[in-house]
Amino acid sequence: MTNSSLIGCGRWGTFLGWYSVNKAKFAQVDMYDIPTSPNFIELKETRKNPYLSLTDNMILHSDIGEVLKNDFIIISIGCQHFRSLCKQLSSYDIAGKTFLLAMKGLESDSAKTMYQIMREEIKQPIHIAVLAGPGHVQDYMKNVPSCAVIDSDEAETTQHVIEMMQSSLIRFYFGSDLVGNQIGAALKNVIGLAAGILDGLEWYGLKGALMARAPVEVGRFIAHFGGNPKTAYGLSHLGDYEATLFSKYSHNRTFGEQFARGENFGKLAEGVPTLQAVKTIADKEHIDMPICQALYRAIYEKADIKETIRSIFDRDLKQEF
C-alpha cells in the first residue's frame, strides 16, 4: 500500500484524509495546513475536530514539503486561495504526481475553474482530477453511503483515482465532462444560497420550482463553455441538491437562510464568491442567468430580498421546454 497526502485540514479535507486511510486504499495520509489555521491548531492539540478523531495513520505536518513527497495529493482549501497555493507548489518538484481537487467553486476575479488555475500556474507535467457530487461529513461518519463523480482530461488518471478511492462508503462514477462537472459543482453552491433564502423567507413551496429551473440555467452556462448541458442533471449538480438545498449541514443553504433573516452566518460559504464570478461572466458573455442575477442583486447590491427573489418567478410567460 502507498501513502496519500492532504493539503487543507478543514471539515471536508480532514474527512477525505480520514477516508483515504480508513476506507480507501492508502496506508498513511500526510496532512498539511497553514500552521496558524484554527483547524490545524485544533487537530494538533486534540487530534480531533467536531466531526471525527484522527487515527494513528493520519500524520500532521507544518511543512508543505513533507506532504509533497507522496505521489497522490488531495487538495481541499478555499477556492479563492487556490491560485496562491499553486504558485507555491510550482516551486517544488512535483512532476508526475496526481492531484485530486476536492473544491467546488470558481475564482471570483477570473471566473476560472480550479483545474484551469492549476494548469496556468504549474507548468510541470502533473495529473489532475476533480471530485464532485453529494456528501456531508456528518452523514459519512454515520456510515451513510453516497455516490460521487471523478473527472479528468486523462482517462487513465480518472481510472487511477477511482481505483484508489473506491469503497463501500462512496461509489465513484467516471466523469466524461470535465468542464461541466466543475461548473455544475460550483453553481450547485450558488443555488444552495437561493434555497436557503427561500427557507429564511419560509417560501418552502418555491424550492421545487427552484430545483426544476436551476439545472436549465446551469446547463446553459455549462454549454456556453463547451460542456454538455445534461451534466447539470448529473451527480455534480442536481445529484448534490439534497446535500446542499435541504441539509442542515450545508454552509451555503445556511448562509442563505440566515441572510434572509438578517443574520450573519460567519463561516465560509463558497457559493458567495462563486456568485460574483458567475455574475461577471454572465454579463460579459450575455448568458441568461435569472436566478444568479437575482441572487447577486440581493446579496451584493442589497436589493429587497422578497421582491428580488419573487422576480425570478414573475418573468414573461413562456413554454417550459
Image: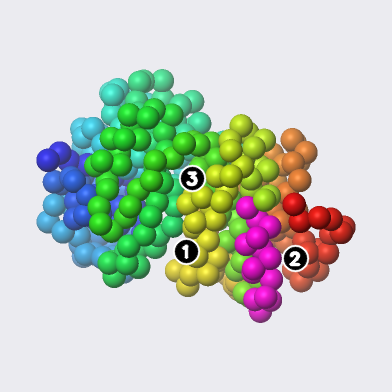
Q: Is residue 238 magenta?
A: no
Mark 1 element type: helix
Numbered circles on residues, count: 3
One can see residue 286 in this view:
yes
Q: Which residues are magenta?
A: 201-215
Q: Is residue 212 magenta?
A: yes
Between tags 3 and 2, which lies in front? 2
Give me the residue at 53% from left, 61% from top. 241
Disc 3: which residue:
79
> Seen in the image, is 236 located left or right of residue 141?
right
Please tell me which of labels 3 and 2 falls first in the chain: 3
Q: How far is the residue under mark 3 from the one under mark 1?
A: 19 Å
Between tags 1 and 2, which lies in front? 1
Q: Quadrant of residue 157?
A: top left
Instruction: Please state which of residues 40 and 309 is positioned toward the viewer in this rendering.
Output: 309
Disc 1: which residue:
243
Mark 2 element type: helix
Disc 2: which residue:
309
Instruction: Please state which of residues 178 and 110 is positioned toward the viewer in this rendering.
Output: 178
Disc 1 residue type (three-letter): Ala
Image disc number at residue 171? none
Give me the residue at 55% from left, 65% from top. 245
Q: Position of residue 305 (x, y in %)?
A: 74, 68
Disc 2 residue type (three-letter): Ile
